[in-house]
């Protein structure tokens, strides 16, 4: 066989599993289809994806049958080795999928209940969602390790989004009168450059301003109210995590009066935890349960003092377990009062999940955009909304930018 064909055969063998080996060898692949590294990769995959008839890794070791070694069994050392193997042989996004499948397909809650195992798990959104869903069952000895894992994900998302969100808010709100008081952090570069272009020195290649413009920072405190109303049903897990952390970023900006609310059939105000410790905030969320969007809208309405200075973001798939007609009317009334109202059907990198298409269309017809948004596109959406741009046009632009 050629080198290319051997590589293709090896890949098919890894995809199809041990049961395919005899058939593939009949095509001339030879006996040694997998080298040592590929064999270890195959064992890591087989532990989750091969149908082993209930034979555990421990049983396989005792019988000496390596082909039946799929399944992780009850042994912590074997789990620890498996976690190390998948992180060695697969890229981070694939590791996340395999870890999730290990819990869902094999019921490996042991990953979450042993500190030494949990410390080897790759921190990601899916694992945080699993920890949130099982938080009441996590033993005391594992809680600190679980908290560190959640913190790692929170820190990564904050690092990824914070700068762009702050720039978006600052860019939107810095459209006000200038102050005679100099402030390095309040320097209006755009206005300063535009109004001093006549002073550009071509020979020296320098702009020599005769006047520098500064923003009036005294008006920045609580200039806008931003309300995040988050559906914490199980199908919204990734969106809940992103929305909550984004809420904590908003809460750190003095220009915004931020409220973060989560709901199922009950309403929980997370504003205080959001402003102090987003990790505690996430552990305060209970994924799953029913949905009463209307009740959450009634609660959030109490925070709207200046409708035209309020941005309301509902993060929900719009499946309403309460009064659907009243829920739709509340959103329409909010929009018509001047509140900038947006419904994010998803706030995630994983695409838009199932949602109530009928409700979404009714809201869209009333000028309330309903669409899925990746976290990286949210700064553009926030800046445009605060600048007073048409939300329907803005939503369409964001959607087109995600394709």
Image: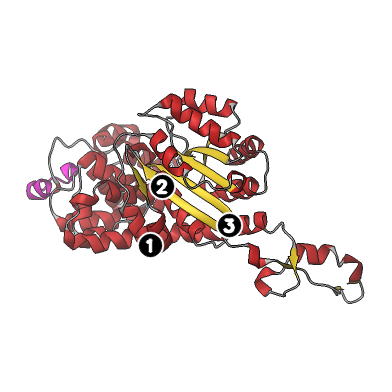
Lower sequence index among marks 1 and 2: 2
- Residue span colored magenta: 58-70
Q: Residues within 10 Å of mark 1 (few under 14, many from 20)?
A: few
Is 287 contained in the magenta span?
no
- The answer to whether mark 1 and mark 3 are in CB contact below 8 A is no
Residue receiving disc 1: 277
Give the number of marks.
3
Front in this rendered view, residue 31 or 229: 229
Quadrant of residue 320 within the rendered picture: top left
Instruction: Give how far across and how far down residue 225 sits, in percent.
Output: 54, 51
Would you say residue 326 is visible in this rendering? yes
Q: Which mark is residue 164?
A: 3
Front in this rendered view, residue 397 or 13: 397
Is 59 contained in the magenta span?
yes
Is residue 48 found left or right of 94 in the rendered image?
A: left
Residue, x 23% and y 57% (percent of image)?
81
Is residue 177 found left or right of 70 in the rendered image?
A: right
Element under disc 3? helix
Residue, x 43% and y 38% (percent of image)?
298
Q: Quadrant of the C terminus?
A: top right
Instruction: Give how far across and how far down residue 15 sits, in percent.
Output: 34, 38
- The residues bearing labels 1 and 3 have C-alpha atoms spaced at a distance of 21 Å
Of the residues tagged 3 and 2, which is closer to the observer? Answer: 2
Lower sequence index among marks 3 and 2: 3
Quadrant of residue 69 within the rendered picture: top left
Element under disc 2? strand
Is 61 drawn above or below residue 199 in the view shown?
A: above
Lower sequence index among marks 1 and 3: 3
Residue receiving disc 2: 261
Residue extending farthest top: 358
């Amino acid at each position: 066989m050629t080198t290319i064909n051997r590589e293709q055969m090896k890949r098919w063998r890894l995809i199809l599993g041990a049961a395919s080996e005899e058939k593939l060898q009949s095509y001339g692949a030879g006996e040694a289809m997998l080298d040592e590294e590929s064999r270890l990769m195959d064992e890591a995959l087989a532990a989750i994806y091969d149908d082993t008839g209930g034979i555990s890794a421990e049983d396989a070791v005792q019988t000496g049958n390596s082909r039946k070694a799929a399944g992780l069994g009850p042994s912590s050392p074997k789990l620890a080795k498996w976690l190390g193997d998948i992180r060695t042989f697969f890229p981070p996004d694939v590791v996340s999928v395999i870890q999730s499948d290990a819990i869902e397909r094999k019921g490996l809650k042991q990953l979450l209940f042993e500190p030494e195992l949990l410390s080897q798990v790759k921190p990601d959104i899916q694992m945080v969602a699993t920890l949130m869903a099982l938080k009441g069952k996590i033993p005391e000895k594992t809680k600190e390790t679980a908290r560190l894992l959640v913190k790692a994900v929170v820190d990564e998302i904050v690092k990824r989004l914070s700068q762009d969100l702050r720039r978006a808010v600052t860019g939107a709100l810095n459209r006000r009168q200038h102050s005679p008081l100099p402030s390095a952090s309040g320097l209006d570069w755009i206005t300063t450059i535009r109004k001093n272009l006549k002073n550009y020195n071509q020979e020296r290649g320098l702009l020599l301003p005769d006047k520098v413009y500064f923003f009036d920072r005294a008006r920045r405190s609580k200039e806008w109210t931003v309300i995040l109303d988050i559906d914490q049903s199980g199908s919204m897990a990734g969106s809940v995590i992103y929305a909550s952390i984004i809420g904590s970023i908003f809460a750190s900006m003095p220009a915004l009066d931020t409220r973060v609310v989560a709901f199922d059939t009950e309403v929980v105000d997370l504003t205080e935890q959001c402003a102090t410790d987003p990790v505690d905030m996430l552990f305060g969320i209970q994924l799953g349960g029913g949905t009463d969007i209307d009740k959450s809208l009634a609660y959030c309405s109490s925070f709207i003092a200046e409708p035209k200075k309020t941005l309301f973001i509902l993060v929900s798939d719009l499946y309403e377990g309460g009064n659907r007609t009243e829920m739709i009317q509340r959103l329409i009334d909010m929009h018509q009062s001047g509140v900038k109202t947006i419904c994010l059907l998803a706030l995630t990198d994983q695409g838009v999940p199932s949602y109530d298409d009928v409700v979404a269309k009714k809201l869209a017809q009333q000028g309330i955009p309903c669409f899925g948004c990746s976290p990286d596109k949210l700064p553009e959406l926030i800046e445009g909304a605060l600048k007073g741009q048409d939300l329907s046009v803005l939503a369409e632009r964001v959607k087109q930018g995600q394709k």
